[in-house]
Amino acid sequence: MADADSKKEEADYKRVHSFPLIRQSDMPEEMRMEAMELCVTACEKYSNNNESAAKMIKEAMDKKFGSSWHVVIGEGFGFEITHEVKNLLYLYFGGSLAVCVWKCS
């Protein structure tokens, strides 16, 4: 019985943390939703390879919204960036994974 309870708690924990939590964004609503969905898809597809996930996001954003997009994915990093206004998204996904997407010219 205790084993079943612990598995249920673990499943609940994973479900609670499987949605993206936007920390900071100045993107227009439509762009933000597309970028957020793209980040979730990439992070789920390449759950063990942050570099491939970042490359997938960067290439898709370059294609859809013009070039010079940058992506950082990882745990425990800080940043100070210069970006174009209305082109920044910083979110958490899966509990401890952070994704920062921005455009600069």
Image (cartoon, rainbow, N blue to C red):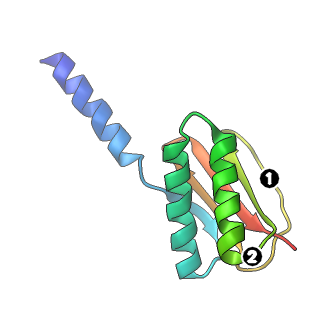
Question: Which residue is at a point 58% across and 67% down the rendered structure image?
Answer: 35
Residue at the outermost front position: 63
Q: Which residue is mark 2?
A: 66
Measuring from the top left, give residue 53's x and y in whole percent.
62, 47
Q: Residue, x 31% and y 31% (percent of image)?
A: 10
- Cβ atoms under marks 1 and 2 closer than 8 Å: no
User: What amino acid does circle 2 point to?
Assistant: Gly
Q: Quadrant of the N terminus?
A: top left
Q: Earlier in the sequence, mark 1 or mark 2?
A: 2
Q: Is residue 41 visible?
A: yes
Q: Is residue 78 left or right of residue 6?
A: right
Left or right: 39 in relation to 84: left
Foreground disc of the pair 1, 2: 2
Q: Residues within 10 Å of mark 1 (few under 14, many from 20)?
A: few
Name the quadrant containing residue 91.
bottom right
| Residue 63 placement (x, y as % from top left) | 68, 70
In this view of the protein, can residue 26 be seen by the observer? no
Tag 1 secondary structure: loop
- Whether residue 34 is situated above or below residue 97 in the rendered picture: below
Horizontal side, residue 66 vs residue 49: left or right: right
- Check the image and report above or below for 13 versus 102: above
User: Where residue 82 sits: x, y (%)?
Assistant: 86, 67
Question: Which of the 4 quarters of the picture holds residue 70?
Answer: bottom right
Quadrant of the rendering where the C terminus is positioned? bottom right
Measured as percent of width and height from the top left, residue 22 is found at: 55, 62
Residue in the picture at 20% in, 17% down:
3
Q: Which residue is mark 1?
A: 79
Distance between mark 1 and mark 2 Cα atoms: 23 Å
